[in-house]
Amino acid sequence: MTDAPKKTALLSAADITGVVEFAHGLHELGWQLVSSGLTAKTLRRAEVPIVEVAELTKAADLVAGRVRLLQPRLFGGILADRQDPGQMRELEREDIPTVDLVAVNLYPLAQVLESGQMSQREAMDFLDVSGAALLRAAARSFHGVIALCDPKDYPSVLDTLRRGKGLSVDQSRRLAAKAFNYISYYDSTVAQYLSDGTAESLPDELILSLKKTAELRYGENPHQGAALYSRSGARAWGLNAATLLYGKPLAFNHYVTMDRATDLVGEFRRPACAIVKFSNPAGAAVADRPGEAARLAYAADPAGCTGGVAALNREVDAEAARVLATEYIECVVAPDFTGEALDILRAKKDVRLVRLPSLLLSAREVDMKTVSGGVLVEDRDNPTAPEGFKAVSKRAPTDIEAAALDFAWRVAKHTTTFAAVLARGEATLGVAGGQATRLDAVRLAVVKGQERHPVLTPALPTVLACDGALERSDLVEAAEAGVTAVIASGGTRSDADLLSAADDLGMALVFTGVRHYRL
């Protein structure tokens, strides 16, 4: 009676975590171990008996080792169908052993690309072609081969083998799926890197390579799981570049709200503060100092701002910190904080302080929304320059009105549709978002402004911005509330009637020519 043929494992790991212990365990079970390069050296130092790949393949080590593992004898032992007698006789005739386990993890190319320190030619030298091919072959042959890409799986696989059992087909299938996912992540990282600056924004095929960067406590609600992912192969930017300086871990809703708030303050060149809650601005202001902007933003709607996220586009200094420290704000996000500001804000128990470098928008950046059975992708609604604004009424806005209109329009852009923003100077008086009709939005913004600011300084005019197509009745309501200038997108059949109403009311009317609906 002949002994059963010895099992063969191929080990080639860029991450050698746990590989020595795993190899020792396989050797004790009588497995033949095949390896090369750094993995082989590591195992030899640990006195684990191995067979060099070159001994198995009987092939020369060509082109600086780039094809060392790309050998027919090696792939034949992996890809052969164990249930096909003809294929097994071929292996026996050519003296090729079956390879029953392939443990391969690839060089961490994403980290190399994220550094941004190499040319494309240099970066491609780190691309692991042979390792990916071996792992793909093993995963494709999961009915007879164990494919391992994650050192975390070594102990459980070894434990199963020690119990005298082979892995079930279901276990091998799950490991194969994990390997294909790993390879896909690797390949898409390379594709993203090579296509940066050249790819169209809405291609026929869109593959994203994302890496989990944070496990979140829960999603929008406690029963929903959630995590934060970053794009691989690129330097961390946006919210993935944020640093939590103080406070409890950030939650899913914090990230969503911070994104809206930082986008809003990023619209302005002067110091700005926006306080956002549940994706809509409660208050926003632009001023000469961050502290004054924070004071005006909170004063716009103290009740609405309570428990919100405050974003500033300047370093938070002591003045701004004192303003924010007197109110209940869940999170403050800014490019930086002075030491004194940190001391002031750290005295608050329930605040989170987040440092976020200034955002640079990519011209090819896109927004995505998941829908049942698919994903909607659109070009990002990038910041709007005021050069396209056009006064269409007989009375042009004054310089003060023009500045207020520009401010209000930018706030409306970051408010869910239908949106209306009532502003005085460069500070909001009332913000209404997510309304079913534009008239509801206008009325709610006016009511908020009147309730919270019953006495207004006559030195500054009140203006209105609306993201929907306005009608005569909207202007009449606005005029009755003291609005002297209005800004809207225009471009609808009601434009002529709206213009006539503005002239009748002595209002300045500005059309932007650009619509900013937001869902």
Image (spheres, helix red, strand yellow):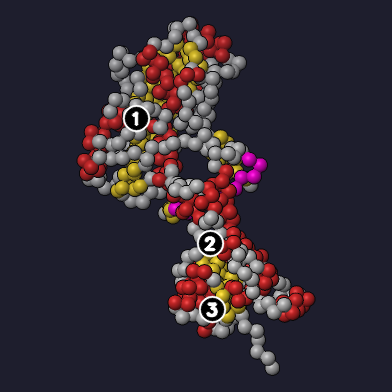
Quadrant (top left/top right/bottom left/bottom right) for the N terminus: bottom right
Q: Mark 2 or mark 1, which has the lower sequence index?
A: 2
Q: Which residue is mark 2?
A: 106
Where residue 323 sits: x, y (%)?
25, 34
Where residue 337 sits: x, y (%)?
28, 40
Q: Which residue is mark 1?
A: 272
Q: As drawn, is 319 to the left or to the right of 401?
A: left
Q: As drawn, is 284 to the left or to the right of 18?
A: left
Q: Name which residue type carries label 2.
A: Leu
Q: Name which residue type carries label 1.
A: Ala
Residue at point 60%, 76% (across, down): 55
**Residue 405 position (above or below residue 15):** above
212 drawn magenta: yes
**Residue 12 position (above or below residue 385):** below
| Rendered image: mark on residue 50 | 3
Q: CA distance from mark 1 to mark 3?
A: 64 Å
Residue neighbourhood size for the residue with mark 2, other residues' Cα within 10 Å, grouped as few (<14), some (14–19), many (≥20) = many
Disc tally is 3
Where residue 445 sits: x, y (%)?
42, 24
454 drawn magenta: no
Nearer the camera: disc 2 or disc 3: 3
Nearer the camera: disc 1 or disc 3: 3
Residue at point 51%, 51% (across, down): 122
**Residue 152 position (above or below residue 414):** below
Residue nearer the viewer, 43 or 362? 43
Residue nearer the viewer, 19 or 339? 19
Q: Residue furthest right?
A: 86
Secondary structure under tag 2 reads loop
Residue nearer the viewer, 482 or 258? 258
Bounds of the magenta segment:
203-213
